[in-house]
Amino acid sequence: MRYLIKGGTIVDPVSETLSHLDILVENGVIKEIGKLNDPEAQIIDAEGKLVCPGLIDIHVHLREPGYEYKEDIASGTKAAAMGGFTAVACMPNTNPVADNATVISHILAKAAKASTRVYPIGALTKGSQGKELTEMADLKEAGVVALSDDGMPVMNAEVMRRVMQYASMLDLTVISHCEDSDLSAQGQMHEGSVATMLGLKGIPAAAEEVMVARDILLAEATGCRLHLAHISTEGSVRLVRQAKARGVAVTAEATPHHFSLTEDAVQGFNTNAKVNPPLRRKADVEAVKEGLKDGTIDVIATDHAPHAYHEKDVEFQYAPNGIIGLETAVGLIFTQLVQPGILTIPQAVAKLTCNPRRVLGLSGGCLQPGLVADITIIDPELCEVVDPTKLLSKSKNTPFSRWKLTGIPVLTMVGGHIIMQDREII
């Protein structure tokens, strides 16, 4: 198919520029960019819309294999395409854990028929138990793009040091879930006045910050590329800022819920606001926004964590942690960050395109002739009210029900194929 994307504003997240040009796509590749006309091409009217490199979410739980009742690769990638993402990187906390080449091969085989590209992340330690290193070279050969025990902190510092040494030799990024489980043990939400009022055990900010500091020091000692998942506290942002200033190879991500919600969202024992790391104080939310603004935080990722209704519809202390995010992320970014002037449009798009790709060592993240046509088109004026019943994810555990969001993806193109157009999966 030949498509001519006409009349839109092309967003270049690398040079942080906007240009009013057209894009010709042919045989899955960007053929030409300029003021174009092509009578043989199918016209995609992008007037008043933003034409962006395909978005990538590098922190997604697709739950397959093992937990397909929550989500699977087919449903998760449809949700991703509806959210404007052309690619996702999936975490290894499956059943069995993605700690060997066989599981990675299974994921990639299923991903071959998915709506978006899928990049698997392999486990750091066997069974994500934090004790014995995985066969990292085998995992890389099988196709992993990074390593993580996401959700399961590596408490033993010597094990983490050896992880980083081997990962560095293999040129793989280590993605760290920063949590001291001794400090956070049995905690249900952020430690503060709201937790006290609700009678819930709190998780102190130090539970995250202690491990952020440790892993930064280990990365500095080993030369390993370290990416810190879902940082959520003022102290964590400060530690990352200081580490970058002295040249440590560290990057960090924030989630939409950590820059959109505070601990008050848990009021009424709302299990859809139960997440790890927990929703924090207003001061932490403001610090995360400032970190996004000044570049301390490189990436926005959803930590899309689907759970079945019956798992969340229980007493707060028994509910699992997790929020779905693929279909609300772009709207929250534009509503919470772009419209208030915290990020420019190119800066926001960079945190969803070139920056996360750089973290994982992936090419792309820009629109140029000769590159694969992974393209996302966003309507910055389109408004939608979040209706969980209409979300494509199998799970509906979102705290953003009935929120009005502005800035919505209207087209997702993967390899020159239109997957979502005008808010419908093709």
Image (cartoon, helix red, strand yellow):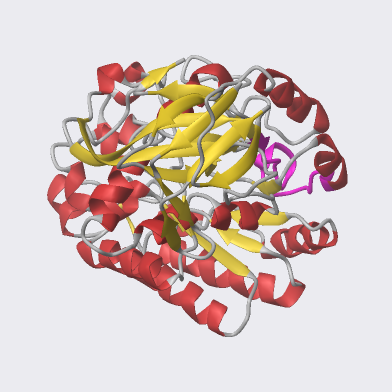
Name the residue nearer the viewer: 121 or 320: 121
Asked if residue 135 is among those painted magenta in the image, a careful observer would answer yes
Q: Residue at x 54, y 30 (%)?
A: 38
Quadrant of the frame with the N terminus: top right
Percent across and percent down for residue 407 are 28, 42
Residue 305 in view here: yes
Above or below: residue 144 compared with residue 344: above
Percent across and percent down for residue 245 are 54, 83
Q: Residue at x 74, y 40 (%)?
A: 144
Percent across and percent down for residue 89 are 60, 39
Name the residue nearer the viewer: 120 or 185: 120
Q: Residue at x 16, y 31 (%)?
A: 402
In the drawing, does residue 81 fall left or right of residue 247? left
Query: Can you tell which quarter of the image residue 283 is in?
Result: bottom left
Above or below: residue 314 compared with residue 266: above
Above or below: residue 378 compared with residue 133: above
Query: What segment carries the magenta color?
Result: 119-136
Asked if residue 91 is among those painted magenta in the image, a careful observer would answer no
In the drawing, does residue 222 fall left or right of residue 22? right
Name the residue nearer the viewer: 13 or 143: 13
